[in-house]
Amino acid sequence: FTKIILNTFFKKLFELISSLEYNVNQIIKKNHELEEATGYKKLLEMTINMLSVFGNEDFSCHGDLKTDQLKMDILIKKLKHKKIAMISTKAPYGERAGEIFSQHSSYKARPRVTLC
């Protein structure tokens, strides 16, 4: 009779121990995830602080400068073509006036500046 009671007691004890081990492992996993998230949060805060300190300075690799120059050149060329189209439609000589204007245009592309 006592063997049956002891067996059920040990069986329940083993189930409780297994359940506790599972819960401990879940808590450890969650703790590790929180520590990792806290680390990322600290890095983000440091980055935000550095950006606010150096916000007025340009610390990029000047890749944006090239794209800005390219956009500016494209816009200038579009304006130039619109002007040629307007002149050729208004001028008595039509396309010939546009050709003359484009040959004597004062626009010259700026040289590319590479700082990196």
Image: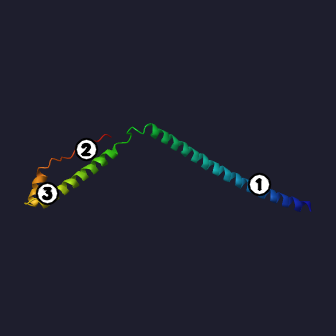
Q: Which residue is mark 3?
A: 87
Q: Quadrant of the C terminus?
A: top left
Viewer-side label of 1, 2: 2
Viewer-side label of 3, 1: 3
CA gap, disc 1 to disc 2?
A: 72 Å
Q: Judging from the image, what secondary structure is the residue with disc 3 in?
A: helix
Q: 39 or 72: nearer the eye?
A: 72
Q: Quadrant of the N terminus?
A: bottom right
The label number, if any, that marks residue 67 in the structure image: none
Q: Residue furthest left?
A: 93
Q: Amino acid at mark 2?
A: Arg
- Relative image position of residue 103 (x, y in whole percent): 11, 52
- Relative image position of residue 79 (x, y in whole percent): 21, 54
Q: Amino acid at mark 1?
A: Ile
Whether pointer 3 and pointer 2 mark residues with C-beta atoms closer than 8 Å, the reply is no
Q: Residues within 10 Å of mark 2 (few under 14, many from 20)?
A: few
Q: Which residue is mark 1?
A: 17
Q: Residue at x 10, y 60 (%)?
A: 95
Question: Which picture quadrant has residue 96?
Answer: bottom left
Viewer-side label of 3, 2: 3
Q: 61 or 71: nearer the eye?
A: 71
Q: Residues within 10 Å of mark 1 (few under 14, many from 20)?
A: few
Q: Residue at x 51, y 44 (%)?
A: 44
Q: 59 or 107: nearer the eye?
A: 107
Q: If you read the primary sequence from the N terminus, does the residue marked by circle 1 or circle 2 appear first?
A: 1
Q: Which residue is mark 2?
A: 112
